[in-house]
Amino acid sequence: MLYLALIILIVAIVLLWQSGRQRKQAGLPGGRVIYTDTRAWGEVDKALYDHALGLTGKPDYLVEQDGQIIPVEVKSGRTPEAPYDSHIFQVGAYCLLVEKAYGKRPPYGIIHYPKRDFAVDYTTELESALMEQLAEMRRDGMRQDVPRSHDEPARCQSCGFRKVCDQKL
Ligand code: SF4
């Protein structure tokens, strides 16, 4: 389970760092503003897991619309003009996990910010970018000598790997 937790945490960190570059390269969807009825949202009991990819994640909600199962990710804090790239990747990962778990490909996922909701289309481009990230992550995971990629003590202060990291600042 520790391995799985590390995987999902690393996904979030790596995607956050690299999302700007990836989005430009992959032509990721930007997100459409939509109206949503939160009464239809159902909480998710347990995390979704895909053994082959070594990926796990738990959307905040799943909603059934026209026979499709749509993952919903709820974000607090400032509502951006457009979804952050890291959030696009995250909801894309949930779409992937929903497809694996239920055998139906969600056409999009929803990011719910305090003041606005966005639909992020689960395009083949988004899926490809995600798979590339996972492959890259697995390659890095096999390495013994992954160097620290920043000089920000504040980042290390709040890092979950601080206790075991020999490069912390
Ligand atoms: S403690 Fe610092 S260097 Fe180590 S993994 Fe965390 S952020 Fe990176």
Image: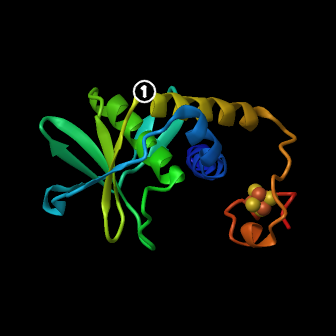
Instruction: Tell me what residue is drawn at x 27 percent, y 31 percent.
Output: 102
Which residue carries the number 1 mark?
124
Instruction: Tell me what residue is drawn at x 30 percent, y 29 percent.
Output: 105
Is there any visible trace of residue 164 in the rendered image? no
In terms of secondary structure, where does tag 1 sit? helix
Residue 68 is situated, as x and y percent measured from the top left of the image, at: 19, 36
Relative vertical location of residue 58 with respect to residue 113 in this rendering, above or below:
above
Relative side of 4 to 35, left or right: right
Nearest the eye: 84 or 101: 84
Residue 16 is situated, as x and y percent measured from the top left of the image, at: 61, 52
Kindly identify the amino acid type of the residue bearing the numbered disc 1: Thr
Q: Quadrant of residue 38?
A: bottom left
Residue 78 is situated, as x and y percent measured from the top left of the image, at: 45, 73
Q: Quadrant of residue 146?
A: top right
Relative vertical location of residue 12 with respect to residue 168 in this rendering, above or below:
above
Q: How is the image coloured?
A: rainbow
Residue 125 is situated, as x and y percent measured from the top left of the image, at: 47, 29
